[in-house]
Amino acid sequence: MHKTEAGGVQLAIGSAGAVRSAYKLILDNARKYSAEAVVPGVLVAAMAPKGGLEVIIGVTTDSTFGKVVMFGLGGTLVETLRDVVFRSLPIDEADAFGMLEEIKGRALLDGVRGAGPVDRRALVDLMLRVSDLAMSYSEIEEIDLNPTIVYPKGLSVIDVRMILN
């Protein structure tokens, strides 16, 4: 679950030889991190553009409220700041836009220190799609899109984890 801490992420790989070396390094690191580690494969993907703001969008199943969607500051900030908000599913556009306004770090969405405002429409669209997905498949227990990097125009989902029951 914590690929970075396990040495399971290699960035800026520029050649086929470097991909092979990174693959071996990821497997070695995984075994050092946990002797029981099973790594059925690795993902090689284009680097996300620099900049942007890391956020988290997720779904969890609450014993009282059922499925709920989560939005907040993401990446390692989610565990450090715990700046997230929740809504029971399904959500609509007004719910999603409202969630953007409820996090303590909402000023970051408007841009700080020369960064432009993030693409709120892209965030809301993704939140609605995640809501629809979770509502359409009862076997989905959890979804984590963390980090999702949102830019002034568009976003990139960097890592996804889904737990099925």
Image (cartoon, rainbow, N blue to C red):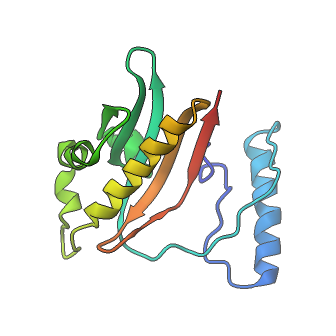
Instruction: Give the farthest residue toward the top.
Output: 64
**Observer-nearest residue: 129 or 21?**
129
Q: Quadrant of residue 24?
A: bottom right
Instruction: Let me know if residue 39 appears in the view.
Output: yes
Instruction: Give the farthest residue toward the bottom.
Output: 15
Q: Residue 119: horizontal and vertical position, in percent?
A: 28, 67
Q: Give above or below for 52 relative to 83.
A: below
Q: Give above or below for 98 relative to 18.
A: above
Q: Residue at x 37, y 39 (%)?
A: 70
Q: Give above or below for 100 relative to 108.
A: above
Q: Give above or below for 77 relative to 11.
A: above
**Observer-nearest residue: 116 or 28?**
116
Q: Quadrant of residue 68?
A: top left
Q: Residue at x 79, y 41 (%)?
A: 37
Which image quarter is the C terminus in?
top right
Which image quarter is the N terminus in?
top right
Q: Is residue 125 left or right of residue 94?
A: right
Instruction: Give the farthest residue toward the front.
Output: 136
Q: Residue at x 50, y 73 (%)?
A: 48
Q: Residue 49: horizontal and vertical position, in percent?
A: 46, 77
Q: Residue at x 76, y 49 (%)?
A: 30
Q: Residue 84: horizontal and vertical position, in percent?
A: 31, 39
* Figure disc tally: 0
